Image: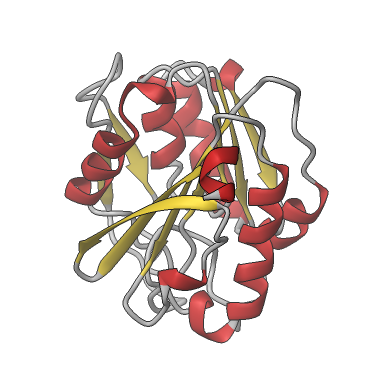
Amino acid sequence: MSARRPTQHHGSGGADSGRRDAKLRVIGGQLRGRTFEYDGYLGTRPMKDRVREAVFNLVGPTVAGKLAIDLFAGTGAMAFESLSRGADNAILIERRFPTCRVIRENAEALGLADRVRLISGDAFIYARTIEPEPDRPWLVFVCPPYEFFVSRRDEMLDLIGRLSDRAPKESLLVVECDERFSTDDLPPDWNWDVRHYPPAVIALGERRTRSEHES
């Protein structure tokens, strides 16, 4: 990965150099309280525990049986949390090779390796090629560096639009941004529940029904 482009991760992005030791924990579900490694790379800022907990409170028990797709995986926390709470499987996309290695090690340590598919690649490319499986709803996390919603706004809207067009019935989209991005620009054929946890803005999307389209 080029040092000039911030890594894909949950959060607003930070410096591309420097490290700090840290651990993260699973907040709920079967693995509640289990910890996993965070490699401390300062270009990856994990979603805060309170925000992650709020997201899964919004999603509720509907996570069960879904395919979790974490497009900017970073620490893998959103996928691990989803699997702990009943998601069938998870796909994680992450560009930074050392981060992929840590995700893989954490999946093994948590006993989730057989339910995780880790793709070392570009989320924007993946979104152009993803194909849904019939009757298998998604829980998609779109939590890139906040700066992407400014410097790569059109690409982000294209990515979210492609996902919303292809998502199977009963899928959910979780978009994390900050105040610089207007959630009014999110696909209008989805109902968006927008919550503010400064500096994070979380939008949970669910496809509108036909009657809502026609009203």
Nearer to us in this view, 106 or 31: 31
- Total labels drawn: 0
Residue 151 in the image: above or below residue 51: below
Q: Is 105 positioned to the left or the right of 71 in the image?
A: left
At a point 65% along the width and 22% down the height, the residue shown is 136
Give the quarter of the image for residue 110: top left
Residue 202 in the image: above or below residue 148: above
Give the quarter of the image for residue 1: bottom right
The colour scheme used to paint the residues is secondary structure
Residue 111 coordinates in the image, percent (x, y): 45, 16
At a point 19% along the width and 68% down the height, the residue shown is 198
Residue 132 coordinates in the image, percent (x, y): 75, 33
Residue 21 in the image: above or below residue 145: above
At a point 66% along the width and 40% down the height, the residue shown is 167
At a point 43% along the width and 47% down the height, the residue shown is 75
Q: Is 53 positioned to the left or the right of 205 in the image?
A: left
Nearer to us in this view, 81 or 210: 210
Q: Is 210 positioned to the left or the right of 39 in the image?
A: right
Q: Is 132 positioned to the left or the right of 107 in the image?
A: right
Residue 84 coordinates in the image, percent (x, y): 37, 21
